[in-house]
Image (tube, grey):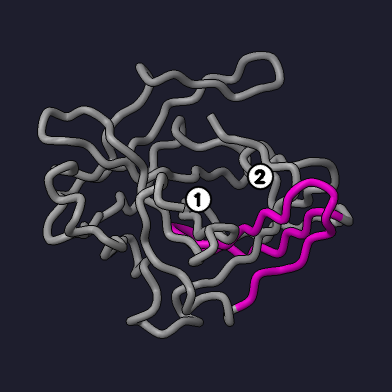
Amino acid sequence: MKTKLNLLVLAAFMFAGCEKEEFPLKSNIITAKVEKGKDYQSEFSSVKVLLYRYSYVGIHYVTTENDSYEAASSSYIDGGFSLTLPETVDYNSLMPLANLFWYGSGVSVSNSSARGFEIEIKGYDKNGVFVDNFEYKSSKGNVKGRFVYVDRDVTITNADSHRMFNLNLKKGWNMYYYRNYGYGYKSGISSKTDFKEFKWYRSKDL
């Protein structure tokens, strides 16, 4: 289900440390105005977040579309949407964070019992047919904001020379950034100076 990137940088930015009008996540509510969003009004009717029930098979957590259920939904209005995410997520929809953030060796999680889930935001037409995802990302598209739920406070780090994790997640919903530099490039950490470049896009636009 998750695409593993060759080179990835993760850095957490919590709501308390950001100005309200700049940050797309407030508590468990995601608010978005999509770039050129009004142009897509005829294509999109609703926006949804799906959660999945996982099964542990061998050494992997697996799921299928049949194991999904709707966790949040919103009408697509005036080129945007507002999603109220569940305050808590069912245990069977969470996986150990070492599995969720498996991007190579050296991942260290402060509490091995911590579990979480990362969401995708999906847009549908008036017939309920999937059209495209929505993403919060930089104008160049190489840095993206991701939304993740964790069931307890936790920190995640990684000593890999090409992937740097520095996540300080609080129980509930969080947003973090990842930056993909492409194969063969040493990574760096995305900073708050990148934040003002971020906007909502439909996935195919960048």
What is the crowding at mark 1: few (fewer than 14 residues within 10 Å), some, or many (at least 20)? many
Residue found 46% across the figure and 54% down from its top:
147
Is 177 covered by the magenta stretch? Answer: yes
Mark 1 vs mark 2, CA separation in Å:
15 Å
- Give the left or right position of residue 110, taking residue 72 as reference: right
Judged from the image, the secondary structure of the residue bearing numbered disc 2 is loop
Which residue corresponds to the image point at 48% horizontal and 61% vertical from the top-left?
A: 137
Mark 1 or mark 2, earlier in chain: 2
User: Disc 1, disc 2: CB below 8 Å?
Assistant: no
Residue at image coords 48%, 74%: 197
Identify which residue, 97 or 7, lies in the foreground.
Answer: 7
Instruction: Say above or below: 180 vs 29.
Output: above
Q: Position of residue 166 (x, y in %)?
A: 71, 64
Disc 1 marks a residue whose amino acid type is Asp
Mark 2 belongs to which amino acid? Phe
Residue 138 position within the rendered picture, expressed as x and y whole percent measured from the top left: 51, 65
Q: Is residue 29 visible?
A: no
The quarter of the displayed image where residue 127 is located? top left
Residue picked out by circle 2: 101
Tell me: 51 left or right of 113. Answer: left
The circle on residue 10 is none
- Vertical order, 124 against 140 (above or below): above
Instruction: Determine whether the residue tagged by mark 1 lies in a helix, strand or loop.
Output: loop
**Magenta segment range?**
162-191
Residue under label 1, please give it.
Answer: 151
| Residue 159 in picture, x, y percent from top left | 86, 56
| Numbered label tally | 2
Q: Relative to residue 18, is residue 182 depicted above or below?
A: above
**Circle nearer the viewer, 1 or 2:** 2
Task: Indicate yes or no whether the magenta region holds residue 12.
Answer: no
The residue at 30%/29% (across/down) is 69
**Number of residues whose C-alpha sits closer than 10 Å to that of mark 2, classed few (under 14), some (14–19) or many (20 or more):** many
